[in-house]
Amino acid sequence: MSPVHFAFSSAFILSLSGLAFHRTHLLSALLCLEGMMLSLYIALSLWTLQLDSTCFSSTPMLLLAFSACEASAGLALLVATARTHGTDRLQSLNLLQC
């Protein structure tokens, strides 16, 4: 495994562990998701460059578009949560209560 692949793999694993273990604020969960998407985008871009294939060239852009949609939906949820509950702490959210 090259050092570049190791760096992006470790960035993905660190973001995944941050999402799994540090779930106190909604903003930190969104940042961990964005870190995962960024490492996936860079790894997928490097993979398509190494293969020199034209059929996979649009895949990183598609992942980037989905990542932008995920980020905008997450920020909209963050704003709605902060307005209704006054905080972005995940312990204050109750999914069973409307």
Image: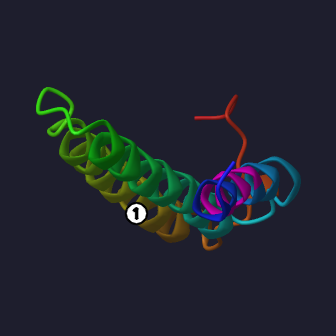
Q: Locate residue 51 relative to residue 42 in the image: left or right.
A: left
Q: Position of residue 95 (x, y in %)?
A: 67, 34
Q: Which residues are magenta?
A: 7-13
Residue shown at 67%/63% (left/top)?
A: 3
Instruction: Say which amino acid is labelled 1.
Output: Leu
Please tell me whether mark 1 sits on a helix, a strand or a loop.
helix
Residue shown at 88%/53% (left/top)?
A: 21
Q: Position of residue 50 (x, y in %)?
A: 35, 45
Q: Quadrant of residue 71?
A: bottom left
Q: Is residue 83 visible?
A: yes
Q: Position of residue 75 (x, y in %)?
A: 40, 63
Q: Is 28 covered by the magenta stretch?
A: no
Q: Is 8 covered by the magenta stretch?
A: yes
The residue wearing badge 1 is: 75
Q: Is residue 92 visible?
A: no
Q: Main secondary structure of the magenta part?
A: helix
Q: Position of residue 60 (x, y in %)?
A: 27, 45
Q: Locate residue 16 relative to residue 85 in the image: left or right.
A: right
Residue at the limit of the structure toward the right, as seen here: 21
Residue shown at 23%/36% (left/top)?
A: 59
Q: Is residue 12 above or below residue 59?
A: below
Q: In the rendered view of the protein, which quadrant contains the C terminus?
A: top right
Residue shown at 69%/56% (left/top)?
A: 6
Q: How many marks?
A: 1
